[in-house]
Amino acid sequence: MKIAFIASQTPKSQKSLKQLTKIYGQCETDSADVIVVLGGDGFMLQCLHQLMNQRTPVFGLRRGTVGFLMNDYSEKDLPERIGQAKKTVLHPLSMKAKTVGGAVIESLAINEVSLLRQTKQSAHIEIKINGHTRIEQLVGDGVMVATPAGSTAYNLSVNGPVIPLGSDILALTPISPFRPRRWRGAIIPSHAEVSLVIHSHEKRPVSATADNTEVRDVMTVDIKEAKHISINALYDPLHNLEERIINEQFS
């Protein structure tokens, strides 16, 4: 098995990189059978973005703090462990944002696309699903669309639902909503297209963020799942990502 190791710059990750390459060798990512990422969730997301156009499976080993997207670290029997791992296919979200200045910026998000107010003024956002207006004006700090993989991240911190992998649904979650007072979000099909229109954008500016890519002063944001892009992530059978997402609903 040809393994390409990628490590974050933390001392812990770099030490593990030296140990693992000494045991298993090292090859380039474009010729590897599997890519092993050493770090935390943030570094894993960064690597998944960089490797998004490659279909090479990715196996993460936790060298950070949280590591929800990572497997437990061990140097023993790594090829056998990878061979027994369960594949989880992740599809990112595609974001198309149009700014007040007329620029159109596109980006991809593995976790979520979030819209947030830029000033002390609350955001006024119209929410459309497949071209139909569902909420004429959401008043609050913002709103997000989260994937199943991202449902336990920012989405969960603002009381959004935890979504099991393979369920073909997305979470549409408001951020500190004021109006409509009783609306706490929605679960929508993964094939749905979400359009968010910013009202009073000069007085109430809003930014849009797709994972780590931020676009300021947006007027409209269109979001849909990029089904044509498949990310193959590998997880240990007894501690896989799907099981972790289920466990989050009972913790």
Image (cartoon, rainbow, N blue to C red):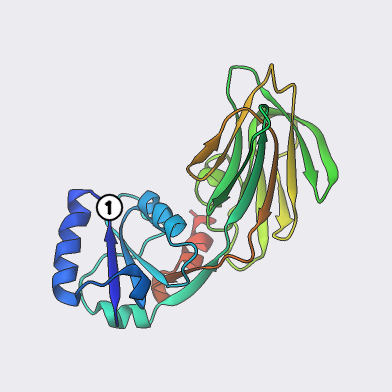
Extreme residue in the front direction: 102
Q: What percent of the width, then of the height, locates residue 55?
A: 47, 72
Q: What percent of the width, then of the height, locates residue 17?
A: 20, 62
Residue 126 in the image: above or below residue 5: above
Residue 128 seen in the figure = yes
Q: Residue at x 58, y 19 (%)?
A: 119
Picture quadrant of residue 219: top right
Q: Residue at x 65, y 51 (%)?
A: 171
Residue 175 seen in the figure = no
Q: What residue is shown with label 1?
A: 8
Amino acid at circle 1: Ser
Choose between 114 and 49: the one closer to the eye: 49
Picture quadrant of residue 229: bottom right
At label 1, counting other C-alpha atoms closer than 10 Å, the crowd grade (few under 14, some 14-19, many 20 or more) is some
Q: Residue at x 37, y 71 (%)?
A: 30
Picture quadrant of residue 76: bottom left
Q: What percent of the width, then of the height, locates residue 168?
A: 67, 64
Q: Residue at x 36, y 52 (%)?
A: 43
Residue 5 in the image: above or below residue 237: above
Residue 18 in the image: above or below residue 220: below
Choose between 167 and 18: the one closer to the eye: 18
Choose between 219 and 196: the one closer to the eye: 219
Report whether 155 appears left or right of 192. Answer: left
Q: What percent of the width, then of the height, locates residue 96?
A: 66, 45
**Quadrant that contains the N terminus:** bottom left
Q: Could you tell me which secondary element the residue under label 1 belongs to?
A: loop
The mark tally for this picture is 1
